[in-house]
Structure formats: C-alpha cells, structure tokens
Image: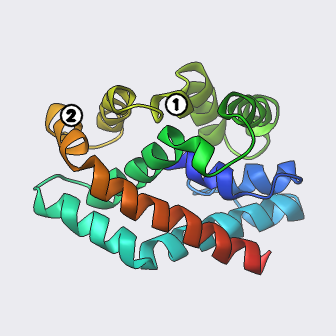
Amino acid sequence: MNYLAHAFISPVDNLEILLGNLAGDSIRHIDTYTLPEAVQTGIQLHQLIDRTTDAHSSFRKMREHISRQGFPYPGVVADLVVDFVLGSRWDNFSQESFRDFKQRIYTVLNSMGNTISQHLTFTSAVLVMEDWFESYRTIHGMNTAFQRLNRKTSREVPVTALYRYLEAEEEILVEWGRSIINDVKRTVESRI
C-alpha cells in the first residue's frame, strides 16, 4: 500500500528497478523470471523494504498502537501512516521538490506500468488519476486514503475514527514514521 515510501527508497537512476519496486504487490500469478533483470531486482528491493520495515521496532510499535485502538488491518494502516509522514514532511527527507518527484514517478507508471502485469496497469492508472501521492500530504488527504482502503478490504475501515486518531496521535506517529523511513532507507542504500 505504501507506494510513496517504496518510490522514495528506490534508486533514482534506474527506472526498471523503480518499476519493479512499485510492482512488488502486483506480481501474483506471473512468472517474474520472464521480466527484465532490473525489474526483478526492483521486486527483490520491494521485498527487502517490506521485511526491513516489518522488523523495525518503530513500525512494530506503530502497528501495535493502531491495533490497540481496535482498527482493522493495523499493518496496512501503518504503511499508509508512513506515507503520510513522508508526504507531509517531504522537505525533511528530500531536496527534490515533491511536485517534481511525484511527476517523475507518475511518468514512469504511465509509460512503463503496463509492461509487468494487468494489476499494475490498473493500479498505476488509478494511482495517477486520483493523485494518491498528493493525498498523503495532509491529514485531510489521509481521509481520502483511508476511504480508498475500503475499496480493497472485506472488513470496513472506520474512516472517520482513523482520521481523528491520526489527528490526535500525529506527534508520536510522526516520530515513529521518521525513524522507520530514515532507517529503512539507510539499510537499503547499504545493500544496493
């Protein structure tokens, strides 16, 4: 779910690795060995990011905090919160403008998204059309992100309650999110 963080952590100089990283959740039922080597590397990068994030102490704290509030899908909600932390405090993480970054990623998805799977083609089109990255920039925008989550889940996510939770707990969630983003980025950079 956290496309923004995956895109941010990808190497900026290899579009196929970026595409593979973004496709990581969209590759079910396809033979990845038939994909270009750099795309396969991107898929492996996606898996490394997920494993490193899931093992991070701050991510575990965030997920447990969300779970204690009674929200369903605490891991998915935590992923979205990490994207919120990154999007809403972009200038703390990157020297590239958010607008330029977003446009670069959307261009890749528009031009190359259909080379991997139909699922990625559809997700890419919706992501760009609905401007998902922009919704992660504000708490109000996260209301929209939480509503999108309900399109994909069998158990309804309480959007209003999540919105209020994010508002009330923003300070601690941002602290945990900052730690996750910085540490995962360092870990990935040391392995590429």
Return the mark for residue 147: none
Return the mark for residue 159: 2
For disc 1, the marked residue is 132
Residue 61: give x, y in percent of width and height: 28, 71
Q: Is residue 155 visible?
A: no
SS type, badge 2: helix
Residue visible at 38% across and 60% down in the picture: 175
Residue visible at 21% across and 34% down in the picture: 159
- The count of marks equals 2
The residues tagged by marks 2 and 1 sit, at their Cα atoms, a distance apart of: 16 Å
| CA neighbours of label 2 inside 10 A, class few (<14), some (14 to 19), many (20+) | some
Q: Quadrant of residue 181?
A: bottom right
Q: Are marks 2 and 1 in contact (CB under 8 Å)?
A: no
Task: Name the residue type under label 1.
Answer: Trp
- The colour scheme applied to this rendered structure is rainbow
Residue 140: give x, y in percent of width and height: 33, 26
Residue 171: give x, y in percent of width and height: 30, 52
Residue visible at 23% across and 35% down in the picture: 163
